[in-house]
Image (cartoon, rainbow, N blue to C red):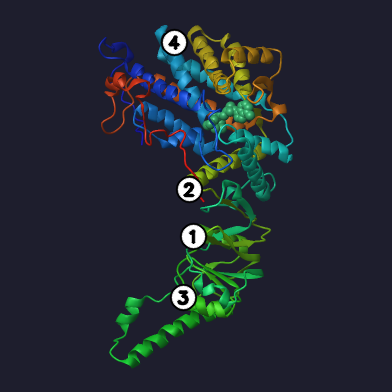
Amino acid sequence: MVDNSVSRGSSITSETDDEPAAWETNMKAGQQLAEVIRTTLGPNGLDKMLITSDGKIIITNDGASILDRMNISNPVANLVVTVAEQQDSKVGDGTTTAVLLAGKLLSEAETLLERGVHPTAIARGYHLAASHAADALDDWTVSIDFDDDDRLREIARTVVTGKWDESGTEFLANKAVETVRAIERDGRVGFERITRKTIPGGSFYDSTVLNGLVIDMNESSTDVVSPETGLPRRYDDATIALIDQELSIDKPNGIGAVDLTSYEDYQALQDYERDIYESHADAITASGADVVFCQQSIDDPVRYLLARAGVLSVERTRRDELHKLARATGSQPVTIEELSSATVGTAETVDRRSVGPTEITVVSGFDEFKQVSVLFRGGTEHVAEETKRMLDNCFYALKLAIEDEAIVPGGGATEVGLARELRTFATGQAGKEQLAIEAFADALETIPRTLAESSGMDPIDAILELRTAHHDGASAAGLDLQTKSVADMTERGVLEPLYIKRRAVASAAEIATMIVRVDDNVSVTGDHGTHEHDHDHDHGPSGAVHSTEGYPWAVGHSMGH
Ligand code: ADP
Ligand code: MG
């Protein structure tokens, strides 16, 4: 955890020659991180992308995923990572943009400081630029038809591009749109309607979206409901009971309560237990239930008695799933004593299926509380987790797109447009602030520059061409990385939710301003802190970052079968 408290001991004017000023140390650390990120995510990012579709190797260059795997010890670097994490958890995308922008704002700030601009003026200029950019951003929204699934797929594709190969990107974009469309109600996308499950084995392309709520049966011993008991694989118009209590007998207590000195006593205990089991099973059948879900365990004899009566019992259902079942089926989780025909609910179908090594139950058919379940597959846990993360990012982007109906062109188009706007805005401002606002504009262009580098385009030519296009009124002109040319991003379908862009610009500005403003080193508890700069020279350009696994930004994993 980062301790954001900033001590304000020394001021920038009291620096001595042998001791670098605090801002210098802080900024150096921020820049180092930005440089590491630029070289790992940036220039080689998009062409070293990818998860191969033949299922052999996974490489991610998802900004958040990479930062997750880095073990960053420098406090300032940590602040930058915090920005990235916030960006990722709040909006699911735009992480690299936020970090690149923050890094560039810091190096621009250093240049300004060297030119004698006071940190306060820089901070003020950045703040002005950021709030003007936030207002101006609305002007870059493009109008598209949000009912058009093709458009939604383009938005999802823009999230994934650069991380997975083309067919993988296509597959994920399709799944994301299928999921979100299934649960969209009155223009709102409720994530509580989505259940995510990672099921080991299979290929990434075996990932599926199922209508209904998927309950994992692996925790539940299925032998007593095996085929020989004759339980159907599928129930139609099923009555569902939910039990919020353990249906078992605590053996040690049971034994302790009876003094087992004779065969008769043993028999008595058996009878006693059988009576309890039977009364449990009777209560459930009397409620009219076809399927019972229990949050805790159900002793095998009860399950057996229920199976004989044609009732499927599922034990150890997770609390959140029991809650979803309650909402979806209209039944109440109750104790066995409270269970009655008034507390049960219904589902159109309850379906038992095998997915790879896992037995699942799909409960579906609710109008009121429509549910979808996404089953993530992939040869290794890592692939499945990466798939999950990427799909989640797509869900976010689609939710924002559908709910806000606000989209901006990607491929650097919006950044170039904003930079242009800021340069005009700067001319009306006071001298020092003006410089900072122009620096902010330059920093925004680091996004198209990085995209150009990553696709092997000449970054200088690309920026000049983009500026010209925007000057000529092509406000959606961005970089088409496939054809390596400047093109209309709306036509090419490179589209991003406005909100993601807004957050990325705002959080980058926030962190840069914060670092420029502090007049002492940002301190953390423990050994880090004001002496961090002593080690700068030893560590080289990546001194701020210690990778945890050697090569964290491109983790290769073979996928077995
Ligand atoms: P990450 O998701 O890696 O953290 P960001 O979302 O911040 O990175 O940035 C990705 C950038 O790539 C965005 O500027 C987006 O517009 C751009 N992009 C995505 N797909 C394409 C594409 N097909 N052509 C051009 N640019 C693209
Ligand atoms: Mg992205």
Is disc 1 surrounded by few (<14), some (14 to 19) or many (20+) residues within 10 Å?
few
Marks 1 and 4, how far apart in space? 56 Å
Q: Which mark is residue 411?
A: none
**Helix, strand or loop status at disc 4:** helix
Q: What residue did someone put label 2 on?
A: 381
Residue type at numbered disc 4: Leu
Give the vertical position of 454 relative to 249 (above or below): above
Distance from disc 4 to disc 2, alpha carbons, whole Å, reads 47 Å
Pointer 1 with pointer 4, Cβ within 8 A: no
The amino acid type found where label 3 is placed reads: Asp
User: Which sits in the foreground, 227 or 220?
Assistant: 227
- Label 3, residues with CA under 10 Å away: few <14, some 14-19, many ≥20: some
Quadrant showing the N terminus: top left
Q: Amino acid at mark 2?
A: Glu
Closest to the observer, 478 or 253: 478
Mark 3 lies on residue = 300
Mark 4–mark 3 contact, CB under 8 Å? Answer: no
Q: Is residue 222 visible?
A: yes
Left or right: where does residue 97 sit relative to residue 4?
Answer: right
Specify which label sits upstream in the sequence, 3 or 2: 3
- Please tell me whether mark 4 or mark 3 is closer to you in this view: 3
Quadrant holding ligand 2? top right
Q: Name the residue that disc number 4 marks.
A: 112
Position of residue 531 relative to residue 375, above or below, is above
Residue nearest the viewer, comparing 407 with 539: 539
Residue indicated by mark 1: 319
Residue 413, how many percent across, how many down? Answer: 63, 22
Q: Is residue 12 left or right of residue 331?
A: left
Q: Secondary structure at mark 2?
A: helix
